[in-house]
């Protein structure tokens, strides 16, 4: 049976890997589905929606959006809550999961994995 490979990009889709090649180019060449990880801080809506648009414009498969709710990344609570709700709403049929500040439990990981892998 086939396995799953997880490759982590660092810093975002448009981080250069050399003078002409960016993370998004590598993902595209590898033909890998993408789980976009975003955070609850101010500015995340713009960052998340621009990233989703960049992936869609290249015809890449977006497997999910993960909202990393770590305390060190948070802004005011009302902004975090509103950002999560807005991203989930605009993600449409893309699976969306919020990762709490505490350790993620195995059932949460399994549920999200089931959604993205199918």
Image (spheres, rainbow, N blue to C red):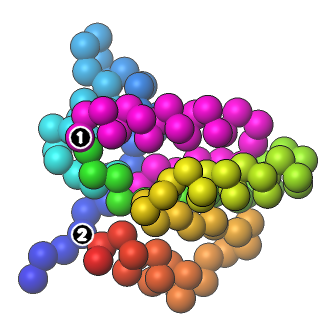
Q: Which mark is residue 19?
A: none
Q: Residue 78, how many percent across, how many down?
A: 88, 52
- The answer to whether any part of residue 73 appears in the image is no
**Residue 89 locus on image (x, y percent):** 60, 57
Q: Quadrant of residue 70?
A: bottom right
The answer to whether the residues at label 2 and label 1 have Cβ atoms under 8 Å apart is no
Identity of the residue drawn at 48% across and 58% down: 92
* Magenta highlight on residue 91: no
What is the magenta range? 35-59
74 w.r.t. 27: above or below: below
73, 118: nearer the viewer: 118
Instruction: Indicate the secondary structure of the residue bearing disc 2.
Output: loop
Query: Is residue 50 within the magenta segment?
Result: yes
Nearer to us: label 2 or label 1: 1
Q: Which residue is rendered at x = 43% and y = 62% of the image? A: 93
Look at mark 2 in the image and give the residue it sits on.
4
* Quarter of the picture holding the C terminus: bottom left
Q: Is residue 37 left or right of residue 45?
A: left
Q: Decide if residue 60 is on the left or right side of residue 84.
A: left
Identify which residue, 19 or 90, lies in the foreground. 90
Between the residue at mark 2 and the residue at mark 1, the CA separation in whole angstroms equals: 21 Å
Q: Earlier in the sequence, mark 2 or mark 1?
A: 2
In the rendered image of this protein, does residue 105 appear above or below residue 30?
A: below
Residue 12's x, y, as percent? 47, 34
Which quadrant of the structure image shows residue 4? bottom left
Which structural element holds mark 1?
A: loop
Q: Residue at x 25, y 63 (%)?
A: 5
36 sits left or right of 77 in the view:
left
Which numbered dot is residue 59? 1
Can residue 23 be seen from the camera position used here?
yes
Q: Residues within 10 Å of mark 1 (few under 14, many from 20)?
A: few
């Amino acid at each position: 049976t086939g396995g799953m490979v997880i490759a982590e990009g660092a810093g975002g889709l448009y981080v250069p890997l050399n003078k002409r090649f960016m993370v998004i180019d590598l993902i595209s060449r590898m033909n890998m589905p993408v789980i976009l990880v975003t955070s609850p801080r101010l500015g995340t809506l713009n960052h998340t929606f621009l990233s989703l648009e960049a992936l869609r414009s290249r015809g890449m498969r977006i497997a999910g959006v993960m909202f990393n709710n770590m305390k060190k990344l948070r802004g005011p609570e009302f902004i975090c809550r509103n950002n999560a709700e807005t991203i989930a709403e605009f993600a449409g049929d893309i699976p969306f999961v919020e990762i709490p500040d505490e350790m993620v439990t195995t059932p949460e990981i399994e549920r999200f994995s089931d959604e993205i892998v199918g």
